[in-house]
Amino acid sequence: MDQAEKKRKLMVGGALIATLIAAVLVDEEETVIDTVDTIQTVKPSGDRVRNQENNVEQLDVSKLGQRKFSALAGELFASTTWAPKQPQVNLQEQAAIAAEAVKSIKSTPPPAPTAPPLQFKYAGKAISDNETWIFLSQAGENLITKLGGKINDKYRLDSINDDAITMTYLPLNVKQTLTINNTIAGAFR
């Protein structure tokens, strides 16, 4: 056992002895409750107690009164809100509001369908025997097509120049343009 451990055990033992002594001294002072109607406090022991044995303070609990709860006090756990209360609408007004909503839905035509944005990336082109082949990628899949060819039966390649590729979205017959970034992809011959 080293010195630090001995010192720690001595300190803990001393603290334990001091706690026991304090507990014995505090036991001499105590508060006693005799009955529900009267509360009697006994003063600390010693010379004061002998002088004040006849002076015992008493408190009449019945004078404190009882708390009375009223039914008008409301619900204790009711939720509260800062929003103003909405006036109640009768059934006829609700039916009229619903009819107006149905009319407005029926009167507005649905939006016209539009082609989805192009998800292709230009990878390059090759010209062979007067045919231009285009290399595209879409979601990690490489695609090759020529002018007039179809891609996934949804797009047709219409034209290509140095700046853009024009495609037609076949389900809606809508033309779309894919711009070409010449600094990344080059032409193969």
Image (cartoon, grey):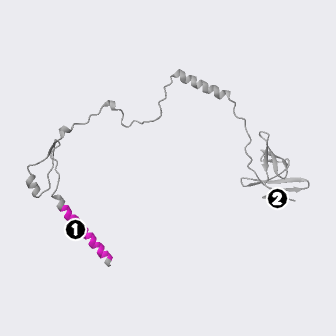
Residue 80 picture location, percent across and down: 42, 36
Amino acid found under the numbered disc labelled 2: Gly
Residue 14 forms part of the magenta stretch: yes
Is residue 142 shown to the viewer in this render? yes
Quadrant hosting residue 6? bottom left
Q: Distance between the residues labelled 1 and 2?
A: 91 Å
Q: Which residue matches tag 2? A: 186
Residue 178 picture location, percent across and down: 78, 49
- Identity of the residue drawn at 32% across and 76% down: 4
Count neighbours of disc 2 (C-alpha within 10 A) and say few if under 14, some if 14 to 19, many if 20 or more: some
Residues in magenta, as a range:
4-24
Q: Which residue matches tag 1? A: 17
Secondary element type, mark 1: helix
> Is mark 1 in CB contact (under 8 Å) with mark 2?
no
Residue 41 forms part of the magenta stretch: no
For residue 3, above or below residue 84: below
Q: Which residue lies furthest to the top in this view?
A: 92
Residue 79 picture location, percent across and down: 42, 36
Secondary element type, mark 2: loop
Quadrant hosting residue 76? top left
Q: In which quarter of the image is the C terminus?
A: bottom right
For residue 140, above or below residue 72: below
Is residue 1 shown to the viewer in this render? no
Return the disc, 1 or 2, that comes first in the chain's sequence. 1
- Identity of the residue drawn at 88% across and 56% down: 127
Amino acid found under the numbered disc labelled 1: Ile
Decide whether the magenta segment is chiefly helix, strand or loop: helix
